[in-house]
Image (cartoon, grey):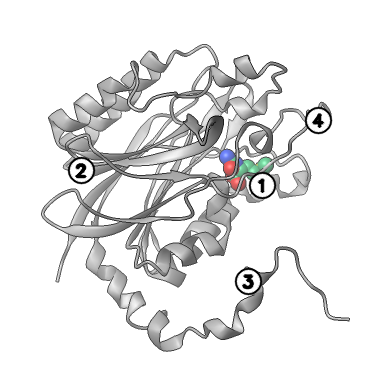
Amino acid sequence: MSRKLIVGAAQLGPIARSDSRRVVVGRLVELMREAKARGCDLVVYPELALTTFFPRWYFEQQDEVDTWFEREMPGLDTQALFDEARRLAIGFYLGYAELAEQDGRVRHFNTSILVGKSGELIGKYRKIHLPGHTENEPWRPFQHLEKRYFERGDLGFPAFQAQFNEHQGIFGMALCNDRRWPETYRVLGLQGVEMALIGYNTPLHYAQVPEHDHLQAFHNHLSLQAGAYQNGMWVVGVAKAGIEEGCDLLGQSCIVAPTGEIVTMCSTVEDELITESCNLDRCREIKENVFNFELHREPDTYRLIVETKGAIKPL
Ligand code: CDT
């Protein structure tokens, strides 16, 4: 069998603090057109793809924080992306900061959506693993205030049946720091996910352990490749890359096969599209063999994973 889906990973170069949503959406549309011209059924953009990575700054006023968030999706400036997707008949994944009025209060999430080729919403994911810190820490060269500006996602790790060409597939989403956690992929894998879509913004400088700065690219690929292999799924990892407002962000966006092999990777830190024809049926090579969950998993021995948060050391 062969269920081929042509996927584009649309890496973005830096977005300036002063760039309007309209300018950024123009770049996304251009990449979408290139993806269509190269035969793509689905195009994947990074995390927080509409603005600069604003959690690198501490803002006193919530009003100022809220200017980075979308109250509607599509909204006035993002409608053009949905219109173009419908015109081209191409699906997309997009990361953005979401302001929602829910349960009688204002909520802030780091969100991604999966949109079908008619411009319809297929699914939404709200980031679970929020890295960084809550308070202003001026000793850092730049802040990472995701824990201050976002709430933990409240949707779990949902999976979606979706069809972007003649074939149906099962898709999941995650955002940036989620990709470092094996639990992310396993929860998706346990829902039969065949392709995980993951946008990221990863500074090369890690303030707490700067000795690891040179390992950022390695850890990125290590995580994406392990997640793909151990769950038998395609993984599409897409960066916002390059020097953004003085902060150097990792590129190396890539598409990983269910065997864990990187099959294509960006070579710049600018707007760049890479594409791959992904046969979703190749997931079976792994899902039906070495990681045949039904046959080989032993969940009753894994209780600690869901019953504890931190490590419990032996006495
Ligand atoms: N956006 C995001 O989640 N970035 C983190 C940086 C970790 S350092 C605080 C990442 O895991 O790449």
Which marked residue is nearer to the observer: mark 3 or mark 1? 3
Which marked residue is nearer to the observer: mark 4 or mark 1? 4
Q: Nearer the viewer, residue 203 or 293?
A: 293
In what element is the residue under mark 2?
loop
The residue sitting at 62% across, 78% down in the picture is 303
Which marked residue is nearer to the observer: mark 3 or mark 4? 3
| Residue 310 appears left or right of 263 | right
Where is residue 224 drawn, in percent x and y?
48, 57
What is the distance, in whole Å, between disc 2 and disc 4 at their CAs? 43 Å
Which marked residue is nearer to the observer: mark 2 or mark 4? 4
The residue labelled by disc 3 is 305
Amino acid marked by disc 4: Glu
Are the two marked residues, 3 and 4, in contact with CB atoms closer than 8 angstroms? no
Q: Which mark is residue 137?
A: 4
In what element is the residue under mark 4?
loop
What is the distance, in whole Å, between disc 1 and disc 2 at their CAs? 33 Å
Q: Give the quadrant of residue 296.
A: bottom left
